[in-house]
Amino acid sequence: MLKRKQMNRKYSLILFACICLVISSCKNDAEIRNTLQKMYGMEILFPKSGIVKMSKDNTNIYNIYNEDNKIVVYVDSSFCTGCTMRKIGEWNRYKKDIKDHIFTIYIILEKNQSLDDIENLYYNSDVLYPIIVDTCYMFRKMNPRLPKEDIFHTFVLNNENKIVFVGDPIVNQNVEKLFSDFIANERKKHKVIKKSV
């Protein structure tokens, strides 16, 4: 058990170093590295009020508090909602991993237009995952240490809601490769846990 924890920690450190290299290719290296170091292990809090859930299936949105692995895509109010829906729809390629219960994707969308308009865009989009519309900007208020730059607004949380991966595989091919490796590693761990139960 201790050996597995050490291996997971070693893997996380290697992954963290790779993410630094990949993301820093488009920004100041030291600044990116410093931001990622601050984010790694940061606990993320979720609002329980002031939110509106939209889902195309029976997903219980409140599982966000106790799911083992969560992919969070946070979209602040400065982004066009229609463009956001098109971008989020690209997460559908990870549907199998979601189906296998390795990850659950949650989209936190700050309200920037009427709920009726957002609802209309959502239900007419290709997005398969539930979204949480943050009507009171509580997510931002509850997580003031979260960087303002959107390149840091897609991350994976563990079962303690602590950040273990940062980066958007949809917009960066290098991050996509790292993300695929991360998913493969989590799938192996998931199989080991299922066998031991």
Image: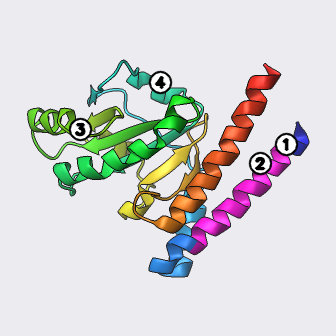
Q: Is residue 27 above or below residue 104?
A: below
Q: Earlier in the sequence, mark 1 or mark 3?
A: 1
Q: What residue did someone put label 1 on?
A: 4
Q: Is residue 182 magenta?
A: no
**Label 2 near label 3: C-beta < 8 Å?**
no
Q: Quadrant of residue 51?
A: top left
What label sits on residue 63 in the rendered view? 4
Q: Is residue 27 visible?
A: no
- SS class of the residue under badge 1? helix
Q: Earlier in the sequence, mark 3 or mark 4?
A: 4
Amino acid marked by disc 2: Asn
What label sits on residue 8 in the rendered view? 2
Q: Residue at x 49, y 51 (%)?
A: 155
Q: Is residue 56 visible?
A: yes
Q: What residue did someone put label 3 on?
A: 136
Q: Position of residue 70 (x, y in %)?
A: 52, 38
Closest to the observer, 155 or 175 = 175
Side of 147 where 4 appears, left or right: right
Separation of residues labelled 3 and 4 (CA atoms)? 21 Å
Separation of residues labelled 1 and 3 (CA atoms)? 42 Å
Amino acid marked by disc 1: Arg
Q: Residue at x 42, y 23 (%)?
A: 62
Q: Earlier in the sequence, mark 4 or mark 1?
A: 1
Amino acid marked by disc 3: Cys
